[in-house]
Structures are given as structure tokens and as C-alpha cells.
Amino acid sequence: MPAPRHIPVVIIGAGPSGLLLGQLLYKAGIDNIILERKSADYVLSRIRAGVLEQVTMDLLHEAGAAEHMDRDGLPHHGIELLFEGKRHRIDLHGLTGGKSVMVYGQTEVTRDLMRVRAAEGLTTVYEAANVQPLEFDSEQPTVRYEHDGQVHEIRCDFIAGCDGFHGVCRASIPEDRIRHFEKVYPFGWLGLMSDTPPVSDELIYVNSPRGFALCSQRSHTRSRYYLQVPLTDKVEAWSDDAFWEELKRRLDPEARARLVTGPSIEKSIAPLRSYVAEPMRFGRMFLAGDAAHIVPPTGAKGLNLAASDVGFLSRAFIDYYKNKSAHGIDHYSEQCLHRVWKAERFSWWMTSLMHNFPEEGAFHTKVQEAELDYVVNSRAASTSLAENYVGLPMR
Ligand code: FAS
Ligand code: PHB
């Protein structure tokens, strides 16, 4: 085994969390390495989020990775809620004093971060196998991994667990030091991507008697659609035609008439869960993004929460190295969780509002109808939805 080297921060995972953290640390002069178990192509092949909050946009600018987002991203000032056959616009911009969101895919964000990292000559070890965070309670943790048939060890000051929900970092924490909070939803999202023009200028969130649907987009020529499906459904059982026919059944007549269908370029089913691990810091190992929490995508918060965790973590490391202060790292978990739980609540609320829960019975459906009517007819209620959707401040 080559002699262990020392790198200040070892980041495990090269998804958006790991890549954004790597860039923010580099910009502050803090050396780091990223260890990723998959290939770069595999990471880019995963179709995930599509909506960025201002906080995320600001961090991408700070990371020097916003050029393509500024060029290709689509600012959105409103969304629509469709229920009982009628669409109701939520004026995000007007209700939040001028805030908006940016429609720009996670795949593009990840590609942009990969590009700037490579341009700066920074190291990302792809296809790093059997990555193990070790001695993270000591003053000098170690990360061991295998690559190209060799075992490697890196000594470091800090480990950033950016390895997602199924990663190794959270799994390395003894059960008596971590608390899990989880809610699993009784359905999944069947997603389809197509090179067809979006059905509408803005996103449409649908609550129909047949289930939830979402009409989203990636550009003026690429659309992203979702259908609520039972957890027992298999993506192989859904032909493109079956998807389009079911989507039409859940839309209003105007959208149904405008819908342009076409061959899927991606189709997959994702389960929905709410999950939070507490705390998010264990000695010199810090969890960020999906490694620490998961939200149902209804509120478009997953990627954005990952970004704000990384914003807090990068500031904490910069505080440590530049100001010799442990204040940031000592308050990291509390700072993140304050924002995480508000996003968990909003994502749970949007999911509860927009999906069918047949097992909950007729009373639940009537309460849902009343809440939808209240949200679109009360300025206070629609303002609450709007300020959460555009993203609460990082504080
Ligand atoms: P990621 O999971 O993206 O990245 C973690 C990385 O760590 C991966 O590349 C993984 O290969 C790597 N890794 C794992 N274990 C490792 C190990 N042992 N060693 C080394 N590397 C390891 N969010 C939204 O806002 N809107 C959406 O519509 C949306 N849709 C989603 C659909 C699906 C199917 C999923 C799973 C998530 C979705 N999300 C959505 C949430 C998603 O966007 C996440 O919030 C986002 O990917 C979080 O980024 P990371 O924290 O970097 O985690
Ligand atoms: C998406 O475009 O993938 C998307 C948009 C908004 C959501 C979830 C997913 O709430």
C-alpha cells in the first residue's frame, strides 16, 4: 500500500453535495479530494432534480460553476395547482417580494461542477471501491479505499459524508450515537423524460381522482413528467403510450389538448420517503445532503437542502482554517437541522396535499379538497406555500 498522504478534507461522494463542497473549499484555498464509487458517466446518468432555489444559485455562483445555468436556466415566477379540473396559479414572484426559482436540471448542475473541478486540476477518484471512513473521532481521521487494484489510505483533518442515502458514512455511525426519523409513503413517482416541448410555461402540480401528476421541464424542448403510481408498479410494465394516456387522464382539457407526446429518453420509478438523521456531525465526520436527509420530491427541496448543508459546511471549514475557530463546525448540525426540518415539513405538507391516499378514506379526501380551496383563495396560505417553495433564507 502506498504511504498514507495527508489531505485536509476528504469528501466521500461526487454527487452535487460533494462536488459543490469541493469547489467552495478550493475557492477558499482548502485542499480536498473526492472519492466516488461509481463512474462519472454513471453519476450523470441519474435523472434527479429540476428546480433550484436562489440559495443554490448563489452557491453555484460562489463556486464559479454558474455560467451555463445563467445561460440555459429558465427563471420561473409561478407554479400552478390543478385540482377539480381547474388550474390555479401561485404567483411565487408577487407573493415573495420578487423571488423566483430556476428550472435547471441536477444533471446539468453536476456536469457543470465536474467541468470546473477538472479545469482546476482537482482530484476526483471515480470507481473508488470499499471506501471506509476510519477514526473519525480522533484528531486525524483516515479514509481507506481501493482503486486500480491497490489499497490507499488518506490521513485528513475532516471527512465530509456526501455519499447519499445509501452511502457508507451514515452507516459507519454506531446506532447509539444517531437518531433516525422516517416516514415512508405508500406510493412512488413514475418519471418520464422526453424531447418534447413542455405542456405549459410553468410547472403544473396535479391532484386528480386518479392520483398526483407533475408537468415539469428541462428546457423549451425537453419535458419531465411524473405520475403517482402504486409501490407495486414496475417501470417495465409502463409503455410510453400507457404513460401518456394516464397523464392525459389526470390533466385539464386545455393541457390535455396542448400535450405533445413522444418517445421517452428516460423512465424510472422512485419511492418516496421523508428521512432525517440526527445529529449530522460525528467527531470529525460531517454528513451533508442525502447522506443525512431525504424529502419526497413534491416540494423540490432535495437538491436545494443538499446545497444549503454544503454552504454551512464550507463556511464552517473556512472558519476553522482561516480564523482558527471551531464555532462553525460545532454549530454545523444545529444550523443545518433548523433548515432541514422546515423543508421536511413543507415537502411532507405538499405531498399530503397533492397525492391520493385511498387508505385514508373519504374524510381525508374532503379535508384535502378544503385545504386546496383554502390555499388558492387565501393570500396568507398561498404566501406560505410560495415562500417555502422559493426557499427559506439560510439565516
Ligand atoms: P447523491 O445521492 O446525489 O450523491 C451521492 C454520491 O455518493 C453518489 O454519486 C454515489 O454514487 C456516491 N456514493 C454512495 N456511496 C458511496 C461510497 N460508499 N463510496 C463512495 N461514493 C459513494 N430532489 C429534488 O429537489 N427534486 C427532484 O425531483 C428529485 N428527484 C429525485 C429522484 C430520485 C430517484 C432520487 C434518488 C432523488 C431525487 N431528488 C430530487 C433528490 C436528489 O436530487 C438529491 O437531493 C441529490 O441527489 C442530493 O445530492 P447528494 O447529497 O450529492 O447525494
Ligand atoms: C423535476 O423537474 O424533476 C421536478 C420539479 C419539481 C419537483 C420535483 C421534480 O417538485
Image: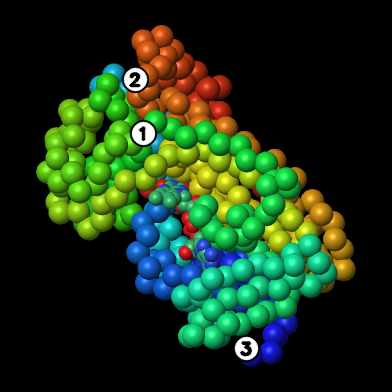
Instruction: Sort mark 2 into few (<14), some (14-19) or many (20+) by Cα contacts within 10 Å.
Output: few
Quadrant containing ligand 2 reads: top left
Which residue bears the numbered disc 1? 187
Pointer 2 residue Cβ closer than 8 Å to ligand 2? no
Q: Is residue 136 visible?
A: yes
* Vertical position of residue 328 compared to residue 383: above or below: below
> At label 2, which amino acid type do we have?
Pro
Which residue bears the numbered disc 3? 1
* Vertical position of residue 133 compared to residue 222: above or below: below
* Vertical position of residue 325 compared to residue 389: above or below: below
Pointer 3 residue Cβ closer than 8 Å to ligand 1? no
Which residue bears the numbered disc 2? 358
Q: In this view, does 22 lie to the left or right of 82?
A: right
* Residue occupying image coordinates x 43% and y 25%: 353
- Per the model, the C-alpha gap separating discs 2 and 1 is 11 Å
- Per the model, the C-alpha gap separating discs 3 and 2 is 57 Å
> At label 1, which amino acid type do we have?
Phe
Q: Nearer the viewer, residue 40 or 249?
A: 40
Secondary structure type for disc 2 = helix
Pointer 1 residue Cβ closer than 8 Å to ligand 1? no
- Mark identifier at residue 321: none
